[in-house]
Image (cartoon, rainbow, N blue to C red):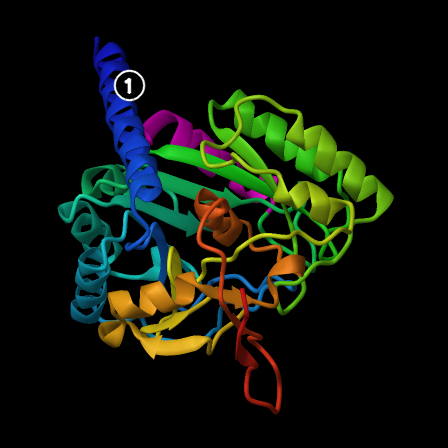
Amino acid sequence: MAATSTSISRRMRAASRKVRELATVGHALAATDHVVMAQIVPMRFCNLSCAYCNEYDKVSDPVPLEEMLRRIDHLARLGTSIITISGGEPLTHPDLDQIIARIRHHGRIAGMITNGYFLMPDRIKRLNEAGLDHMQISIDNVQPDEISKKSLKVLDKKLEFLAEYADFHVNINSVVGGGIKNPQDALTIGRRALGLGFTSTIGIIHDGDGQLKPLQDEERRVYFEMRGMKKENYSRFNHFQEAIANGEPNQWRCRAGSRYLYICEDGLVHYCSQQRGWPGVPLAEYTREDLKREFLTEKTCAPNCTISCVHQISYIDHWRAPQTRQVSPGLEGTVAELVNIQL
């Protein structure tokens, strides 16, 4: 009886989550004056040191809870539909549950990206109680090595705990490129994820500026085989990474700074995790006028960008509002190019 009750509860939560997701898409299609997704960092510290990652350190303290709540409240004022917590490793933040609860208090979809190391049954149940909607875990290999310790061998028991206890959606993301030794590991990881009832995605590791690194032949083969697997992630409605896998640029209108925001541990708004400093405005000072400006600003880094979450959100508006300004973020030793484009 208890198992039946749990199954019914999960189905009800999943149905409610799907309704809210559809409402988010409808709202995004109907209006452009709000943020669709914000990724926010409460913790720069990470317990791991993956060789390809530039989004962590070993010294930072957690952002104080009061400040995190203020940031969540301001994102709500900007109309943000989805707030995803990342890091560093967010599960090392002592007040993470209250941060998630604040997101849900505002009626927003709450997501989290984690390495999964701290997932035990009690911790998963607390995430359920806080109202977490989505979790993504990236698993890079089957056996840990000097590139990454995010291995299936280490995390498989955590996945079993999630399958048994999690009321939220779980996606397992495997990767190719970036020095990962055995591309075939992605297939093993994907099959294990699907077998446990999760969704499975595959990503392409970018360089230090978030730019394209073409895949080798075997990496491409694995990538396209993974793409053919069923039960894909709910958010994968575009195919821009297919061009990346083939070493080809994409032509698209990046809406970073408008429909997508990346808020670092210092509370600054950036285009994404790889273009820090642009625009580099404190979130507390970010307004709907900033959203409007960045919606119409072309980013010259876009054609070779591999940051899938930015592209997925921007794709909602690919058919409208040609961009009339241009900025080249990340230029060293010079002021970024900012010009008006004649229509």
The residue at 45%/31% (across/down) is 234
For this orientation, the residue located farthest to the bottom is 333
237 with respect to 6 (left or right): right
Which span is picked out in magenta? 151-166
135 with respect to 342 (left or right): left
Prevailing secondary structure class for the magenta stretch in the rendered image: helix
x then y, percent, for residue 264: 38, 70
Residue 62 in view: yes
Q: Choose between 308 and 258: the one closer to the eye.
A: 258
Residue type indicated by callout 1: Arg
Q: Choose between 97 and 342: the one closer to the eye.
A: 342
The residue at 63%/24% (across/down) is 229
Q: Quadrant of the N terminus?
A: top left
Q: Choose between 152 and 97: the one closer to the eye.
A: 97
Q: In which quarter of the image is the C terminus?
A: bottom right
x then y, percent, for residue 69: 18, 63
Q: Choose between 205 and 185: the one closer to the eye.
A: 205
For this orientation, the residue located farthest to the front is 343
The residue at 62%/34% (across/down) is 189
Q: Mark 1 points at which residue?
A: 11
